[in-house]
Image: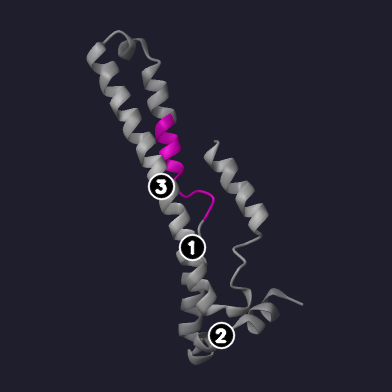
Amino acid sequence: MTWEDMLIKEESNILNALDSKQKKKLKKTLQAAEPSEYFGQDFTQLGDLIGMLEELDLVKDDSKMKKKMKSINEQNVDMVATASKLRKQYEQLYRQVRKIVYPKSAGSLRDDEKWQKKIMKWWTY
């Protein structure tokens, strides 16, 4: 069975009600909206950059700069925590929308175990 056959079997009333152009657009949009392993990677990279700056002698020797970098680092940690919460909410909403479009495969957000390993790998990056 090909992936195309699987999609045909999974289609819902919503997909059946659309013309081919609308159906294609909805499927592409749904696929693009799927959470990726890179969600929030920018925050991690910013943390790395902040860490690098904090290690510079220029920052270490300047108490004002040191204090400012500490504040920036704390803000980044707060953003990462917020991103984690938002990530979970995003996945839950995505599953709800996917369930409407593909009711038979509603629970599958990729292979959940594989997916969680990718997410954990990203968060510990």
Q: Is residue 116 left or right of residue 44?
A: right
Amino acid carrying label 2: it is Ser
Q: Which amino acid is tagged 3?
A: Ala
Quadrant for residue 55, please give it. Answer: top left
Cβ atoms at labels 2 and 1 below 8 Å apart: no
Q: Secondary structure at mark 1?
A: helix
Of 23 and 60, the residue lying toward us: 60
Disc 2 target residue: 12
**Outermost residue, left direction?**
64
- Residue at 59% of width from left, 63% of height from top? 109
Tell me the SS state at disc 2: loop
Looking at the rendered image, the quarter that the N terminus falls into is: bottom right
Locate residue 58 relative to residue 115 in the image: left or right. Answer: left
State the CA–CA distance, disc 1 to disc 3.
Answer: 14 Å
Which portion, as a residue range, is magenta? 36-47
Q: Which residue is labeled 1 in the image?
A: 92
State the separation of the CA atoms marked 2 and 1. Answer: 20 Å
Q: Position of residue 50 (x, y in %)?
A: 38, 26
Q: Residues within 10 Å of mark 2 (few under 14, many from 20)?
A: some
SS for dot 3: helix
Numbered circle sitting on residue 100: none
Question: Mark 1 or mark 3, which has the lower sequence index?
Answer: 3
Numbered circle sitting on residue 83: 3
The residue that appears at 25% across and 12% down in the rendered structure is 63
Looking at the figure, which quarter contains the C terminus?
top right
Q: Residue at x 66, y 83 (%)?
A: 9
The residues tagged by marks 3 and 2 sit, at their Cα atoms, a distance apart of: 32 Å
CB under 8 Å between discs 1 and 3: no
